[in-house]
Image: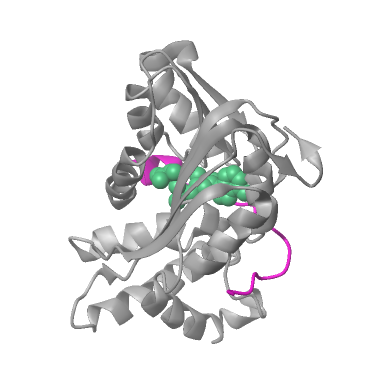
């Protein structure tokens, strides 16, 4: 089983939401496929867990003509951008709430939970799955995807090396990064342990090729290494950190490539279940 890093369960982080909204195109492509796996009639209440700027919440709402989406995220910037994007079109069919998913306190409010590219930012998957199980009504589906297995192993390996060098090392200490890339089997075990049934998990390669050096630089800055950059005290140092990774990629046979791997999961809260002695 993949070992989970110790606490904190979540690295608090703000995002450059307008840049994310523009550049996170691979995430939308991946998310479309995840959404196709979600069985919907069209009148349900569905949580988008880690909604980001709402580009996928929008596609979710298109599948809910008589339903509602509850868009959850811990980032104020992301939620503000999502509200700008979604409220004019969907009005009160979408609600926004700032929340740490691992500490979610919702009880049987959702017919389904949908989530993309978010769970690997949370290190305590036991707590996360328990909280999501609780938020689901009996019979509700969890359909999600996140980074897993050897996700972005090449550039992460390179970043680890840069982080151990000065002038970065004094700011990074022994921190190794914010992510938890779980495996398929250990995730299935954690989902079962949280009470889920009909569990299916699998990893797929989802490589991304950015079109130019500038696009690669912005993608690393906004999407991949924002938490790393938060630890560096000056703009010059942050630019230097990204420069090192851009220069490394330029020297690779396939420049501007990222070896993304996606962990997919489908699981269901039983229609009538007994978990930890509680009849639901
Ligand atoms: C890479 S973005 C994905 C956004 C969107 N789902 C997409 O696919 O474009 C990850 C999102 O997860 C959110 N996030 C990370 N940790 C979280 C937590 N513990 N609770 C709630 N949201 C979290 C971030 O704020 C961010 O908006």
**Where in the figure is residue 153, as x and y percent of width and height?**
41, 76
Q: Residue at x 25, y 61 (%)?
A: 214
Q: Which is nearer the eye, 108 or 200?
A: 200
**Where in the figure is residue 182, as x and y percent of width and height?**
53, 67
Above-or-below relation of 35 to 248: above
Above-or-below relation of 204 to 29: below
Q: Is residue 3 left or right of residue 219?
A: right
Q: Is residue 58 left or right of residue 193?
A: left
Q: Taken as a whole, is the magenta stretch helix, strand or loop?
A: loop
Visible residue check, residue 201: yes
- Quadrant of residue 31 in the image? top left
In the rendered image, which quarter contains the N terminus? bottom right
In the rendered image, which quarter contains the C terminus? top right
**Where in the figure is residue 194, as x and y percent of width and height?**
67, 51
Q: Is residue 192 left or right of residue 23?
A: right
Q: Residue at x 59, y 54 (%)?
A: 191
Visible residue check, residue 15: no
Q: Residue furthest right?
A: 277
Look at the image and give the residue range highlighted in magenta. Answer: 1-21
Above-or-below relation of 150 to 48: below
Q: Which is nearer the eye, 229 or 264?
A: 264
- Quadrant of residue 253 in the image? bottom left
Q: Residue at x 68, y 43 (%)?
A: 131
**Where in the figure is residue 69, as x and y percent of width and height?**
48, 24
């Amino acid at each position: 089983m993949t070992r989970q890093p110790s606490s904190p369960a979540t690295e608090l982080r703000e995002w450059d939401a307008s840049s994310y909204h523009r550049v996170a195109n691979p995430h939308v492509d991946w998310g479309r496929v995840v959404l196709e796996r979600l069985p919907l009639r069209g009148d349900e209440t569905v949580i988008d867990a880690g909604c980001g700027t709402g580009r996928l919440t929008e596609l979710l709402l298109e599948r809910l003509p008589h339903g509602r989406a509850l868009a959850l995220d811990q980032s104020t910037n992301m939620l503000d951008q999502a509200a700008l994007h979604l409220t004019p079109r969907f009005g009160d069919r979408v609600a926004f709430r700032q929340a740490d998913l691992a500490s979610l306190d919702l009880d049987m409010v959702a017919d389904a939970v949908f989530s993309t590219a978010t769970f690997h930012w949370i290190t305590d998957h036991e707590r996360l799955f328990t909280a999501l199980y609780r938020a689901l009504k009996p019979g509700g589906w969890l359909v999600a995807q996140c980074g897993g297995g050897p996700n972005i192993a090449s550039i992460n390996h390179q970043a680890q090396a840069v982080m151990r060098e000065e002038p970065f090392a004094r700011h990074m200490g022994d921190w190794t990064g914010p992510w938890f890339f779980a495996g398929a089997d250990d995730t299935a075990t954690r989902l079962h342990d949280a009470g889920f049934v009909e569990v299916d998990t699998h990893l797929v390669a989802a490589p991304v090729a950015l079109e130019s050096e500038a696009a690669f630089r912005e993608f690393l800055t906004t999407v991949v290494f924002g938490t790393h950059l938060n630890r560096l005290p000056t703009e010059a140092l942050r630019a230097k950190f990204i420069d090192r990774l851009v220069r490394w990629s330029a020297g690779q046979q396939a420049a501007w490539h990222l070896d993304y791997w996606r962990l997919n999961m489908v699981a269901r809260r039983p229609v009538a279940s007994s978990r930890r002695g509680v009849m639901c």
